[in-house]
Amino acid sequence: MKATILSEPHTRLKHRYRDSAVHLFKVGQSVRLRNGFERPPRAADLFRITDTLPPSGGSPQYRIRSDTERHERMATEDSLEAAL
């Protein structure tokens, strides 16, 4: 058996996950966090997809960011909805 050494294994692994997962939302798209309570959406609830991540529990994950916050969040696809 012959072993192959891959350069930059983390980068290759990350791209492999991105290609294998079917993400509903695209980088740059505006989304809102789903809410169990019925209330009107606010501008502060608007997020932008900044990156796609490997699935967790069968649900694709995303990095999201709001213009009103200084940090990014991680959210699963089932907790997001498209912002119109």
Image: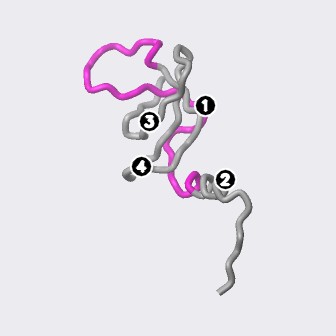
- Foreground tag (1 vs 3): 3
Q: Quote the CA–CA distance across marks 4 and 3.
A: 10 Å
Dot 2 falls on a residue whose secondary structure is helix
Which one is nearer the viewer's eye here, 37 or 56? 56
Q: Quote the CA–CA distance across marks 1 and 2.
A: 21 Å
Q: Residue at x 56, y 19 (%)?
A: 70
Amino acid type at circle 4 is: Ser
**Which quadrant of the view contains residue 36?**
top left
Sort mark 4 into few (<14), some (14-19) or many (20+) by Cα contacts within 10 Å.
few
- Foreground tag (1 vs 2): 2
Amino acid type at circle 3 is: Ala
Amino acid type at circle 2 is: Thr
Q: Which residue is label 1 attached to?
A: 28
- In the displayed structure, does residue 50 sit left or right of residue 54? right
Which tag, 1 or 4, sits closer to the chain's start?
1
Q: Quote the CA–CA distance across marks 1 and 4.
A: 21 Å
Q: Which residue is label 4 attached to?
A: 56
Q: Where is residue 84 in the image (x, y as percent from the top left)?
A: 48, 23
Dot 3 falls on a residue whose secondary structure is strand
Which tag, 2 or 3, sits closer to the chain's start?
2
Q: Which residue is label 2 attached to?
A: 11
Which tag, 4 or 3, sits closer to the chain's start?
4
Q: Quote the CA–CA distance across marks 2 and 3.
A: 21 Å
Which tag, 1 or 3, sits closer to the chain's start?
1
Q: Inspect the magenta stretch and tell me whether residue 13 lies in it.
A: no
Cβ atoms at labels 1 and 3 below 8 Å apart: no
Q: Which residue is label 3 attached to?
A: 75
Magenta residue span: 17-45
**Which quadrant of the view contains residue 41?**
top left
Q: Position of residue 68 (x, y in %)?
A: 53, 14
Sort mark 1 into few (<14), some (14-19) or many (20+) by Cα contacts within 10 Å.
few
